[in-house]
Amino acid sequence: MRRTCGHTFYVKNLCGTTEIGVKITDCGPQTDLWCGERSCCNGNCATNRLIDFTPAAYSAIGNLSSGIMPVTIRS
């Protein structure tokens, strides 16, 4: 699901019910550095980092101190 900068994705934390819309503002080249990283919540798991958020966007759907969280992403 690769999209260019300016595209809006809708992201939902698998640990909660909140969904937010986020716009891609920077398409960084280093996503391969995080392959295999896994995060789980109540049996819902996600592997690999797919997207980085601003602190404001992250705190809208999760606890900022958690670092990573399992999410679903739709276009």
Image: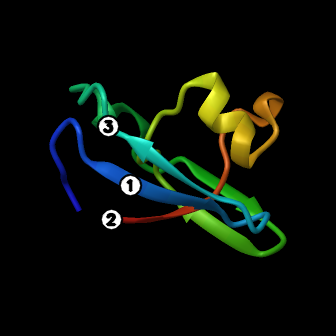
Dot 2 or dot 3: first in sequence order is: 3
Q: Marks 1 and 2: CB-CB under 8 Å?
A: yes
Q: Name, please, the residue furthest toward the bottom.
A: 43
Image quarter (top left, top right, bottom left or bottom right) of the C terminus? bottom left
What residue is drawn where x is 32% and y is 37%? 24
Q: CA distance from mark 1 to mark 2?
A: 5 Å
Q: Amino acid at mark 1?
A: Phe
Number of labels in the image equals 3
Query: At which x and y percent is residue 73?
Result: 45, 63
Q: Amino acid at mark 3?
A: Ile
Q: Which label number is shown at residue 75?
A: 2
Q: Marks 1 and 3: CB-CB under 8 Å?
A: yes
Dot 1 or dot 2: first in sequence order is: 1
Q: Tag 3, which secondary structure?
A: loop
Residue designated by label 3: 24
Residue designated by label 1: 9
> Which quadrant of the figure has residue 59?
top right
